Image (cartoon, coloured by chain):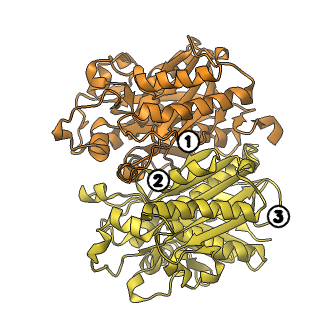
Chain colours: A yellow, B orange
């Protein structure tokens, strides 16, 4: 069994490909006004979303993304065997508190902004391996919870660095099943941690670019493919600066992403000066996938997509201790209908 | 395939059982002087372990647990397809920084004190599903990093509540493989989040007891077994008070654990008044398993063991916001040699 399901040393290739039978995205007002606006399933008019704290608002959005995704597929919570979820909050409490409401076996994961794709890859493996009929992957982030946890009190109004990224207020969820119709997950390449010595927590795109490059190269080698074998290579979320760094690093390796690469960090907002280098957060690629890419795969507009989500694995404590920023990138390839 | 590998709605039963070919535990001085002392592979004389911060010391212990476990099995890092790891630090940085040194595809997980068993369950599924030749699960904690992150500056010397638990300074790792000899993982039951409204962060045993009970009951039902079908049901880490609460809740359901139940929180230290209700932390059941239970399974002293690790999914922020403490428990059953 092993030989036919696993290629190279890093990529799981699924003989029985899990189907992404539905996906849903919930967001805040700023995201709703962005280019993806019409694709969201639920848009809140304010960032508290009817709760009394931003943390609870984030957790609510995560829960609703899961609930809407299940409803779209006419499934109830009892139909799901595993829920993989994570977020940026200390002790991933947005996910833990969301999971409390859903009564689905809960597997907490943490990969910073790579969390959604880590969850989709693990959920795919459990479904493809015959250990689950259905599994859900979900991830969330919130601009205001992230700002006050990672940076400054939100009231402070500090001057943002041009390399910084704007954390998405939103959540995405995807329902994977061993039957049904929809886009199918073909493979999963888990990332190895890379650290090029970047120490600036306001420049996570540069810190994460090497992880994107390492995972992309290993995936392409394992699958004996080039970038042109994909309609879309979607990174998330390198932003403008990280994308430039990544393309430069890839050029040195003779890999050219021209025409196939987009970054989810550049798709969520109009790129005003306030947004600086782009969007970020666990909710970034999660909402871009659910609100846009899943739909295009379902409609047959995209035939083969590589999703590579990158995460910076630092914390305020490690930055204060003068450590550099290790990063990781996880990839799944998805086939359209 | 699904029918034969999955029983009930919650438990994965592995037709091809992954072998735990090795396990290793590293700890600090207090743990080294405890009852498990002779079982540890490496004991540090001080809690800094040669580093300049407790956080780096924890990360070093985690890395060394993995390295020693691999060396015991005569394996190198390249022989491992996935590393599942997590810890209690914000953004699980002990694990992320450990993963940076090892160059193994890294999957970050978070289940608080349930992390080690979540990792073993997921690693087992990936090996049993044919997606990995070998996978490592690891978890760590550190008394001093936990105290200053969750409670008070360590210099403060506050009066500990009698219900509180002492975070283990240590790390454990287990190497799972699709061949070789050693104890075998028979099944994995992922937990559903339980919340009985406990709000005291100094009484996590009581908060976690309902999660232990829910997972135990679902596991026994799925497997059509009773507690007496196991030589040992090891919880981790309910402590003295949580164990009492759990047995009371089980009694109401007609389940009697007399003679088969031990709690890893009561095995690490001599139970002096300072330890209060017992040991805790991701490193608790991880080190108890590696330093004691794995050895007894390998020697045939134990024939069938159920490991149920519990985790409290709160954070200081959720406590400050007056939220109760949701908890989860994950279980794996392991067969001796």
Mark identifier at residue A92: 2
Can you tell which quarter of the image residue B35 is in?
top left
Regarding mark 1 in the picture, which secondary structure is present there?
helix
* Residue drawn where x is 36% and y is 32% of the image: B170
Q: Name the side, left or right, on which B111 lies relative to B199.
A: right
State which chain disc 2 sits on: A
> In the image, which is nearer the foreground, mark 3 or mark 2?
2
> In the image, which is nearer the foreground, mark 1 or mark 3?
3
x and y percent of residue A28 in the render? 51, 75
Q: Name the side, left or right, on which B121 lies relative to A111.
A: right
Can you tell which quarter of the image residue B140 is in?
top left
Distance between mark 2 and mark 1 Cα atoms: 31 Å
Q: Quadrant of the C terminus of chain B?
A: top right
Residue sitting nearer the eye, B126 or A259: B126
x and y percent of residue B117 in the render? 54, 35
**Do the residues bearing badges 2 and 1 touch, measured as CB atoms within 8 Å?**
no
* Residue A232, above or below A175: below
Per the image, the residue denoted by label 3 is A181
Distance between mark 3 and mark 2 Cα atoms: 32 Å
Label 2 crowd (10 A; few <14 / some 14-19 / many >=20):
many
């Amino acid at each position: 069994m092993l030989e036919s399901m696993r290629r190279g040393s890093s990529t799981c290739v699924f003989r029985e490909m899990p189907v992404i039978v539905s996906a849903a995205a919930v967001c805040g007002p700023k995201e709703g006004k962005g280019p993806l606006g019409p694709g969201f399933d639920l848009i809140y008019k304010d960032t508290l979303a009817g709760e009394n704290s931003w943390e609870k608002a984030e957790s609510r959005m995560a829960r609703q993304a899961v609930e809407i995704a299940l409803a779209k597929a006419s499934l109830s919570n009892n139909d799901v065997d595993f829920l993989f979820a994570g977020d940026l909050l200390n002790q991933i409490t947005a996910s833990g508190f969301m999971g409390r409401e859903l009564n689905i076996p809960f597997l907490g994961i943490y990969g910073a902004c790579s969390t959604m794709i880590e969850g989709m890859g693990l959920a795919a493996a459990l479904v493809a391996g015959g250990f689950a009929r259905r599994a859900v992957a979900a991830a969330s982030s919130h601009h205001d919870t992230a700002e006050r946890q990672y940076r400054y009190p939100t009231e402070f109004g500090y001057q943002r660095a041009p390399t910084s990224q704007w954390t998405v207020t939103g959540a995405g969820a995807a329902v994977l099943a061993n039957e049904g119709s929809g886009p199918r997950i073909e493979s999963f390449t888990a990332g190895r941690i890379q650290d090029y010595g970047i120490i600036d927590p306001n420049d996570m795109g540069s810190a994460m670019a090497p992880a994107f490059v390492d995972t992309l190269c290993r995936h392409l080698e394992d699958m004996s493919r080039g970038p042109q074998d994909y309609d879309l290579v979607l990174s998330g979320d390198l932003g403008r600066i990280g994308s430039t760094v990544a393309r430069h690093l890839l050029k040195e390796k003779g890999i050219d992403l021209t025409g196939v690469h987009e970054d989810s960090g550049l798709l969520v907002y109009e790129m005003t000066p306030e947004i600086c280098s782009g969007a970020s957060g666990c909710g970034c690629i999660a909402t871009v996938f659910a609100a846009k890419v899943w739909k295009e795969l379902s409609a047959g507009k995209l035939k083969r997509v590589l999703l590579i989500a990158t995460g910076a694995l630092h914390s305020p404590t490690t930055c204060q201790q003068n450590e550099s920023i290790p990063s990781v990138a996880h990839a799944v390839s998805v086939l359209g209908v």
